[in-house]
Amino acid sequence: MEPIIEIRGLCKDFRVGFWRKRVRVLYPLDLTVNSGEIFGYLGPNGAGKTTTLKLLTGLILPTAGSVKLLGHDLAEVAAKRQIGFLPEHPYFYDYLTGREFLDLCGRLFSLAAPLRRERIARLLRLTELQTAADQQLRKYSKGMLQRLGLAQALINDPRLVILDEPMSGLDPLGRKAMRDIILQLKAEGRTVFFSSHILPDVEVLCDRVAILAAGRLRDVGRLADILKTPTEDIELTLQRVPDRLLPVLQALAHAPLLYQPGGVLVRLPDEARLDDALRAAMAAGAQVVTVAPLRQTLEEHFLREVQGVAQ
Ligand SMILES: Nc1ncnc2c1ncn2[C@@H]1O[C@H](COP(=O)(O)OP(=O)(O)OP(=O)(O)O)[C@@H](O)[C@H]1O
Ligand SMILES: [Mg+2]
């Protein structure tokens, strides 16, 4: 696996107020993102996500630490040429059309006119903005602007795409469109690093995530590993349960039995007790409907990680 982003001891202090008091916004951060990954950078408001992304793109300078992108130091032009960036609050020129705006972005990368034309056509197609391409940006909706912002980030055909809250402010359809584009970027072999606090989107998209709270990294890893709890409960649903079986099930269960229309839901703490419950249920002539391990959701994990971390 080839590392695409290598962050070592990256740290940022801001000076605030009249006395220029030093405030630490990002505590020394170590993080590696590999080639071809979709990596989610999660954290509540004010956690330091945008600050990290600005450090990664060289928009602000670190207090300490280093960043390597595609093996190059951030200061080298070679690094910047291969990254695309969608800022949190992109600024658009209202009176340009979508096509003109992308052309301007292409010129900033010194792309020749035929190449710009070809790329712009491809990006308008990818972001489904073909029909709006010749409208002025002041007539674009929030979702269209966000997709144009993404098209802008791709004009230089980057290997690494860094997106700050690409889904924020979008309706479910807009979020779906953005998710599909991000998956398409991965299919094209690009690496995507994006910040978000919209957890369902992260759950369906990301290979790995990092969770940041109050400037500190709380957790990093594959979602499947992060969400695995040491005590994974198992839910057993039974039907046609004779009354005499109920106390037996309750004795094995982790929580009070839940009576549902036509059945009983039993929450068991481990597989050994699942076996006991299944055996007792069979012997008593009850019918097993489902057996399902209960995975905690990213939302539950996220809340646990960031809870009690004061800003
Ligand atoms: N230029 C600055 N000067 C002083 N403090 C700053 C500056 N930029 C950011 N901060 C502070 O750094 C902290 C982290 O901000 P940042 O914008 O990185 O958070 P975030 O995780 O992106 O939050 P959000 O989800 O709201 O976008 C906040 O407390 C913010 O007030
Ligand atoms: Mg932010």
Image (cartoon, rainbow, N blue to C red):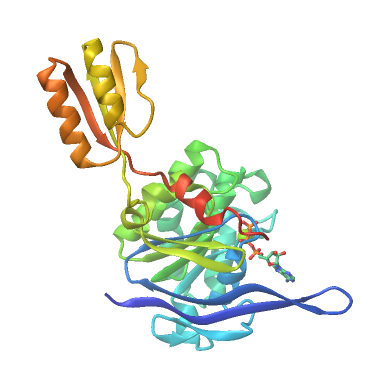
Q: Quadrant of ligand 1?
A: bottom right
| Residue 192 x %, y % | 41, 63
Q: Residue at x 40, y 57 (%)?
A: 122
Against 57, is 232 above or below? above
Identify which residue, 242 or 240, lies in the foreground: 242
Q: Is residue 11 visible?
A: yes
Q: Residue furthest left?
A: 283
Question: Which quarter of the figure is the N terminus placed in?
Answer: bottom left
Location of the C terminus (image quadrant): bottom right
Q: Position of residue 80 (x, y in %)?
A: 50, 79
Residue closest to the eye, 238 or 50: 238
- Residue at (31% x, 61% y) in the render: 188
**Is residue 178 at all visible to an observer of this figure?**
no
Q: In the figure, is residue 255 to the left or right of 196?
A: left
Q: Residue at x 52, y 54 (%)?
A: 196
> Viewer-proximal residue, 99 or 185?
185
Q: Position of residue 250 (x, y in %)?
A: 30, 25
x and y, in percent, of residue 42 in the image: 51, 58
Q: Nearer the viewer, residue 115 or 263?
A: 263
Question: Which residue lies at the image location 35% right of the left edge and 23% below the top edge?
Answer: 257
